[in-house]
Image: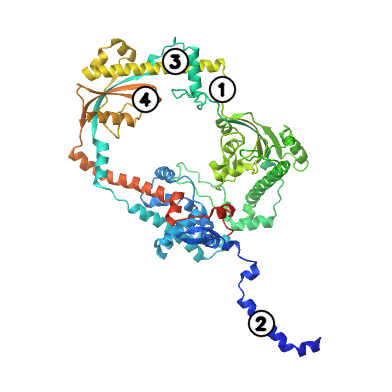
Amino acid sequence: MMKFFRKYTKHLLVVFMSLLLVVWLAPSSMFRGGPTQEDEAVGKAFGRTVRYRDLMPAYNQTQTLDLLVPFWRMPWYYALHQLGLTDPRALQHYGRTVREEELSPTEWYMLTAEARHSGVHVTAEAVEQFKRDHIGPRDIRAVRDRRRVSLEHIDRALHSFLQVQEAALLACRAVQISEADVQYFVRQAKERVSVSIVALKAAQFLDPSYEPGDQELKEHFDQYKNTASRPAGGLEFGYQLPEAVQIEYIRVNVQALTDRQTISDEEAFRYWKDHTDEFTRPATQPATATKPKTPPKAEPYTTFTEARGQVLEKLQRARAEEEALRIARDLIVRLNQPWEGAPTTQPGNYRQPPESETAADVYPRLIDGFQSKYPGVLSYARAHLLEHPALRRHPEIGRLTALRGTKQQIRLDRAAFLTAGLEARPEDNPDHARYFQNVYETCAEPFVDFDGNAFVWRTVAIRPKQPPPMSDTLREKLIADLRDLHAYEEAERRARALAEQAAEVGLEQALEAVPALKERLGDSALLKPEPFSRREGPRLYSEIGHDRDFVETCFSLGGQETTRPARVAVHEQRPREQWLVVQWHQTFPVTRAEYDEQRSSAIPYYRLNRQMEVLKSWFDEEQIRARIGWSVDAQAEAEKPSQPAS
């Protein structure tokens, strides 16, 4: 062997160097077995292909922002603050108006890409100022240690956040207010009208002796039997029974699991070391006669020995919640095994229930098999057939949620109605398509309550929307509704007759000419409100309510041409079950002094409202995609995961 190496040393060296050259020149994909997920195309933006690797920096930034600037998911709140809204209640109101859902990491990538593409400039000084104003050095150090990232990475994440903010603010600050806007505002606020009003309520014409015939009852029922029921009454009739479901469920008790968890002191110490701010001494205040203006601040424990009890309790609880979910998923796997390979039905493509799964004791038998392993942990219950409001109010399962904090989040009171035979369809909401199931099929995802208890459940019975069966109770309701409708129609007839007479002699004189009607309506039937503007409306909320259409009717009467002595109109208020007869007397135009006074209010009012519209459009998901020209291949979209691994 040694002779062989001595003889062919030069040849072997040539082969070895050739191999090194091949390794150096060969593409790395040769060793990766082809392109990786990072190379896969996700879509196109600004006419260029976007791959998974392009998304990763933005996704990594969102994970950092989650710790430093949690409100990055709703950046319009910060933008509203920058535009001058400082009142927390106003911020909350306007923020919900802009958008209720949080931004997804993919939307964040789109917004940051758009800001860079538009050349939005944010200085390093602005980033440092933001850190001084909103983030302390201690928080930055904690994020560096926890995520093991550099200061440069943190600065880049904050720079992107400020870029997105600045792009939205630039669009808002471009809003211009015209002189026509100001004139419209002043006219709405200061032009006034004087009218007199008579309200004719349906209740004033109710005839308890009115008995509708069988044919009238049948026709009324047939007209509204497939209209959703309205238990509150009124003139919006509907008798259809809503959808209802019956749920049975297994509860995994997290409290029963907590005491079973074993946490070592080493593990507890490591957690405390990384999260010292989470464990604080009970706040105390000095015994003084006067209450301090600010409550005393709770201070973190300085040693692990002091915090040990709290740390162990928290870690035990967290581990118990994880185990509850694990047990729930194990139960789901076992319950869904009989469904594997089950034939599907059309339409809907739902799996047909195996005969074994239609039994009433499927869940109780499963619990019996787990009792020895998890004594006292599992419990069973079955609810009655419940409509949606009743299910939502259920004390134990009404507020359960699955995948909280994700785009697929859903509450049980909604998921329970995503069942074969009911109205909802998977295509209505693709994010919730995974929750659609057949009767007797266990939901594939565990649900949890606010205490961390996990729930496994299935729908065992449904009632689709349907007309109610005829009964004495329903007949009584039909008679009462027809009496109300008859009274409302009589009020309309009287209102139109009164308006016809009022157009000739005036409303007050016309009412005086019909003593029986005046007596029925009462001494305060004729209303004479103070002149009012469009924005104010008549200050008769108890009689008229807030009715913009009625206010506009009052002003429009002043501009109508008529050959009759008085300008009169009849206005319907069906929600209040009454008719209004209104006579116009005079319109008071805006004075120059009023115009000058209101001008200073008009400009900020319109600017804020227009800026709100800009923000609403700016952060709308469809608008974000449209601005960057986002397009996705349908097949790639169906196959790609929700986000790449960081």
Q: CA distance from mark 3 to mark 4?
A: 18 Å
Q: Are marks 2 and 3 in contact (CB under 8 Å)?
A: no
Quadrant location, the N terminus: bottom right
Q: Residue at x 62, y 66 (%)?
A: 34
Report the side of 174 relative to 116 (left or right). left
What is the x, y in percent for residue 371?
Answer: 76, 39
The residue carrying mark 3 is 483
Mark drawn on residue 468: 1
Q: Residue at x 52, y 60 (%)?
A: 55
- The mark nearer the N terminus, 2 or 3, is 2
Quadrant location, the C terminus: bottom right
The residue carrying mark 2 is 18
Q: CA distance from mark 4 to mark 1?
A: 29 Å
Q: Up-down: is 34 above or below 242?
A: below
- The mark nearer the N terminus, 4 or 2, is 2
Q: Residue furthest left?
A: 592
What is the x, y in percent for residue 62?
Answer: 52, 57
Question: Type of residue at label 2?
Answer: Ser
Q: How many marks?
A: 4
State the image quarter where residue 36 is shown: bottom right
Q: CA distance from mark 2 to mark 1?
A: 87 Å
Query: For mark 3, does the 10 Å Cα neighbourhood hold few (<14), some (14 to 19), or many (20 or more) residues?
Result: many
Q: Residue furthest front?
A: 346
The residue carrying mark 4 is 573
State the image quarter where residue 530 is shown: top left
Question: Type of residue at label 1?
Answer: Pro
